[in-house]
Image (cartoon, helix red, strand yellow):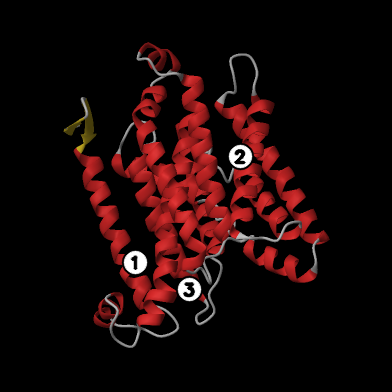
Amino acid sequence: MSTLTVRGRGRAVHVPRRTLAVSAALVTAALGLAALGLCYGASWVGPADVAAALTGSGDAVVVVRDWRLPRVLAALVFGAALGVSGAIFQNLTRNPMGSPDVIGLDAGAYTGALIALTVLSGTPVQLAATSVLCGLLAAAAVYLLSSGGGGPSGMRLIVIGIAVNAMANALNAWIVLRAELEVAIAADGWSAGSLNGVGWTDLTVPLVVIAVLLAAMAALAHAMHQAALGDAVAAATGVGLGRLRLRMVLVGVGLTATVTAVAGPIVFIALAAPQIGRRLARAPGVPLLPAALTGMVLLLGADLVAQMLLAPESLPVGVVTTAIGGCYLLWLLGQEVRRR
């Protein structure tokens, strides 16, 4: 496979040309969907009017810049965050089922959000803090329960994660049932994962947090791919596996919890995006860039479908991603059966 070598700061990075081509195609698709998202809504706004609104002129400034642009930006950034989070945990577990929504991290983060809504005052800072904290607690529970011998194996971690996910969902249901009626209705609707009503005030802190976490993961990408070659190879090349895995878990949980704190648990993007991106790029391991870009395209496309299905009513995007994820799981199981 031909590669392109990028040099900087004394390090050479070899990027397969196919990965670059696939990434360029995914960026083009994401930009096309973003343009459609700015045009489509309760009323159609033509591309020329959208361009004028983005520059601050015309009659559609409020509709485009204040209502639709935050939603489109949230879908792009949250899709990238979920794609990278899924790639992190699939690399850690070396299993295509190892994503945050399967192993209980989404449900754990949602528990924290519910605690902020029902016990605390539910401010954005409280939602983010409790979501991250409970997501980390879920990750610690999965890791400790699946540990044995030389550490947790991929399949054991998946099975334990599914059990933790079920227990967290049961706890979440109990919290909703015990909450006041108005809070319970809002929390139940939010549990599907929704971008409805997302505005600039909801995005300021999450966008900064996600940007920092993605930058941190980009710095760890080389070591992550070294670790994917095997523990012995990683140790021989000077990779500290324990420290690397801890940092990867912190970044992965932080990305998932930040998205959950704003939009609720949007499932299956973290599961499907990394594997779709890997197959498109035909890359070894689970590369981060195709996973992030595929997550963008999947979430933005799903949100557009959610707006169109019962227009003018807009469905929670999680309803559509669940349907996509179900089809993906059937396909993945079919692939596993054929291999055996």
Circle 2: element type: loop
Circle 1: element type: helix
Number of other residues with Cα within 10 Å of mark 3, as a class: few under 14, some 14 to 19, many 20 or more: many
* Quadrant assignment, res 50: bottom left
Q: Is residue 8 visible?
A: yes
Residue 258 image position (x, y, % from top left):
53, 51
Identify the residue position indicated by label 3 in the image.
307
Foreground pick, 54 / 141: 54
Three-letter code, disc 3 = Gln
Three-letter code, disc 1 = Ala
Q: Residue at x 40, y 66 (%)?
A: 72
Identify the residue position indicated by label 2 in the image.
103
Circle 3: element type: helix
Badges 3 and 2: C-beta atoms under 8 Å apart?
A: no
Q: Earlier in the sequence, mark 2 or mark 1?
A: 1
Foreground pick, 171 / 340: 171
Identify the residue position indicated by label 1 in the image.
34
